[in-house]
Image (spheres, rainbow, N blue to C red):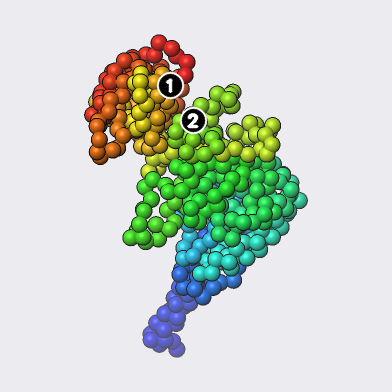
Amino acid sequence: MWTLHAVFQGLLMLGLCVFTCLMASYGTAGIEQKCPEFTALNIAHAVIGVDLKVQLLLYTRSNKKCAENLIDLNLTTSLNLNVTKESIFVIHGYRPTGSPPVWINQIKELLLEKEDANIILVDWNRGATTAFYPNAVKNAKKVVEILNNFIEEMLINGASLDSVYMIGVSLGAHIAGFVGKAYKGKIRRITALDPAGPSFTEALPTERLDHSDAQFVDVIHTDTDALGYEKPLGNIDFYPNGGKDQPGCPQTLLAGMQYFKCDHQRSVFLYMSSLTNNCNVTSYPCDSYVDYRNGKCVSCKAFQPLPCPILGYYADKWKDRLIDKDPPMTTAYFDTSDKDPFCMYHYFMDIVIWNKNSRSGFINIKIIDNGGNTTESKINSDAATFLQYRQVNLLAGFYEDFDSVSKIALTFSTRNTIGPKYKLRVLQIRLKSLSNPDWINLCRYDFILVENIETTFRPIPCQDMDM
């Protein structure tokens, strides 16, 4: 006979068994459904060292939030990879602290908003995380072999090199270059975001990224005086703010790690900004940043019907301009603001004076709109030499863009603390918007600038529209 106590024990055991089975089933399902994620390590891993392990994390518009790790799959079994679409590989660089790049998810999301493509995050954090940089360089070459094997499999399954686009950051830029070399420069495009300088500065073209590694190679240099590569490497090399100190980045060691990585990382944020519709950052082909700053390269008339080169995602529109160049390379310069979307609105000003004696100095430029809002030029050119009846060209860049200019304020200065104060007798000034070239040119005639005194006036439409 079953006693009441025995029945109770039996029911209790049955309940525990059912609960355990359900939890086991739920746990298994949870493991099966867990999405692969970018490898997260820490400084301890950098000190101890980790063996190279690569993930190829695929995101498409069908699986925006949950990646497939293609490294573990036969491509025919992938649920989301469509080899007939464009495949964009995003390759990070050296990771001295082991943390995932702060921008990695954002760039994936922005690319998917822009294009129905295969976005493949090349996660080689186990290999890039090391306190000894040469180890990361060595591992980078192993990543190249893995990517070459994967692309070969894609080609076997119907992909085309014309649909392969690689975005490489720092050391990742050279990885992209090596992959491109393996395919004799036939992949569609490589975008190199501040390619690494250490270990590559003196390298031959066969040992680093080169303009011949893809059908089109565009490069953004933002830290050429420290972690980045200084010389041109691509078909078009962009040097925002001269390629060195970026506005908004800390200037002292008191900022900690930001002091070391802000300039280097800015290249990525500039590229991501180009994926939004906030503004297009226009650049100006020029031989040097000094020439650009001194207003010598503010026109793209020589390149018409093409517009001035646009930074980032749309840089490949400049490709046709390079066909007849030998070598097919261009350097382009521009200035940016200190925060996203980094736009600066450029104006070109020319001045003609009628002083009999030459004057050397600087002119500060402000523009005021109809509402009384004022913005001041952030571009500091070298001292200009003003000669009688000789045109002097100045470049001005503003963080704000006004629909209309109501007034212009100018201040002339020699920046001398002693000696007489000079006057600049202006025969004509002319202001042209480079950001909005269809706007009417604005002029003012016959007035005097007294040193260190701001002179404000209302401009009028220029009598001669040619510049």
Other-residue count near label 2 (Cα within 10 Å), few / some / many at <14 / 14–19 / ≥20: some
Spatial distance from mark 2 to mark 1, Cα to Cα?
15 Å
Q: Which residue is mark 2?
A: 296
| Rendered-image quadrant of the N terminus | bottom left
Q: Which residue is mark 1?
A: 390
Eyeballing the image, is 370 above or below 118? above
Residue name at image x 36 percent, y 31 percent? 360
In the rendered view, does 193 fall on the left or right side of 140?
Answer: left
Residue name at image x 43 percent, y 58 percent? 260
Say which quarter of the image contains residue 247. Answer: top left
Other-residue count near label 1 (Cα within 10 Å), few / some / many at <14 / 14–19 / ≥20: few
User: Helix, strand, or loop for circle 1?
Assistant: loop
Q: Residue 36 at x, y = what percent?
A: 54, 60
N-term-proximal mark, 2 vs 1? 2
* In front of the other: 376 or 352: 352
* In front of the other: 257 or 431: 431
User: Helix, strand, or loop for circle 2?
Assistant: loop
Residue name at image x 28 percent, y 25 percent? 423
Residue name at image x 49 percent, y 30 percent? 296
Tag 1: residue type? Arg
* In front of the other: 269 or 261: 261
